[in-house]
Image (cartoon, coloured by chain):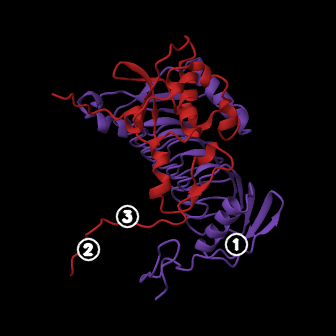
Chain colours: A red, B purple
Amino acid sequence: MAQKSIAIDAEVLAGKRFEYQEDMSLVDDLDLMELTPGRDLNWLEDIHLLEEDGIPAVFDRNSNAFLKIYFEIPEGREDEIARKVLMKHLISGNSYGIQLKERHCKFHQVELGPWVADSKSVGDDYTPPALEGWEPPAH
Amino acid sequence: MAGLTRSGVVYDARGLVEPDPEPPMTAQIDGDRAVIDATDLTTRKINLELKRIVYDEGVNDVTILNPGSRHSLGVGILKRCHITFEGSPGWYACGLIDGPEVQINGRVGWSLAENMMSGSVVVEGPAGSLTGAALRGGDLVIKGNVGARTGIDQKGGTIIVTGRAGINTGFMMQRGRQVICGDAGDGLGDSMYDGLIYVGGNIASLGVDCVPAEMDDSDHEFINRKFEIYGLGTPPDLKKFECGKVLHNYDALEPSERKLVL
């Protein structure tokens, strides 16, 4: 019998695991101060290393999913690395919530959010999805 | 009846929405800066113009003159930029923003920066009730007093109030931090699940499951850093409060419910 999972993982939503979940060198050079408003970490202060299914993970509020981290995290850098993995996920456009914007945004906004300058706009030409063969009942 | 607009508004029988979706094109743009004089503009026109120059014109520093206490100004800006209000916005100012650094040279009404995701809002005066309601991230600084239920349902971010706070400050707070430099009213931190509240003045009474805690080095580092960034001088002696966790039932929650409170 197939195993049933009730978890919502970033990699389950994407159908694949991302390289930066397994290789710290891909996130280590990110400048978190540059990526956040103001003179400190701003909203990233609330991002901490958590655990999901017994594996270190960071929570992505944009897709309501955990992003698991499979590489060994140096002691004392837990939150920093969690924040860097999350930001890499967001600025790469791999967050499932961001990917939904292209089709489902109902108003004008930047696709990748405030973290990426000159990100393209989405939401200008929203049309409600139509179910083929269905028509609203006559009232 | 108006045609279908880009905003989707076709007809508003109550007259509360202006179906015309076109920005007024009245901003004075000078390079990376722009000024909007809101004197003769409706709320919707002000917001349309603000979004036009921030998103379409690529302006990153906008000043709004004469906001005239209109409600819901500066809402839904999802981009890094600087916005200055010369005057006082009304209710629900700067709600749902993600990225802007906002300076308000005036006072504000209810629900300032409701559901802010990131960025900062600094007010050079008092604010009404429900300031920072459902705040998710970023910094909210009020250089004055605030009304009741500051940071109700707060889920992240930092709220700093240099004056007094009303009743039920931090009501149902789930995460984040509040620094109240003056007195706090009855029911401080009532039914809070998590988060930290620092109070410099007298507290009328603590709410359910809000308990005193010991200040440590990380608390002092955080408070000193925020006061330095926002030029607030020397922090007062603060008392720290947190959740007593008597009301915690996380273990009984479904995984999907648990994620909703993260």
Identify the image quadrant of residue B126: bottom right
User: Is the C terminus of chain B in the top left, top right, bottom left or bottom right quadrant?
Assistant: top left
- The subunit carrying tag 1 is B
Residue that badge 2 annotates: A135
Labelled pair 1, 3 in contact (Cβ < 8 Å): no
Instruction: Give the percent coordinates (x, y) of residue B257.
Output: 30, 38
Q: Answer yes or no: are tags 2 and 1 on the same subunit.
A: no
Of B105 and A4, which appears nearest the observer?
A4
Residue A91 visible? The answer is yes
How far apart are labels 2 and 1 at the CA level?
45 Å
Task: Give the vertical position of B257 relative to B110 (above or below).
Answer: above
Q: Nearer the viewer, mark 1 or mark 3?
A: 3
Residue B151 visible? The answer is no
Mark 3 lies on a secondary structure that is loop
Instruction: Give the percent coordinates (x, y) of residue A79.
Output: 54, 23
Q: Amino acid at mark 1?
A: Ala
Outermost residue, top direction?
A: A75
Outermost residue, left direction?
A: A1
Of A84 and B19, which appears nearest the observer?
A84
Residue A129: numbered disc: 3
How far apart are labels 2 and 3 at the CA level?
12 Å
Q: How many marks?
A: 3
Q: Answer yes or no: are tags 1 and 3 on the same subunit.
A: no
Of B88 and A119, which appears nearest the observer?
A119
State the residue at coordinates (50%, 24%): A21
Instruction: Give the percent coordinates (x, y) of residue B48.
Output: 62, 69
Outermost residue, right direction?
A: B30
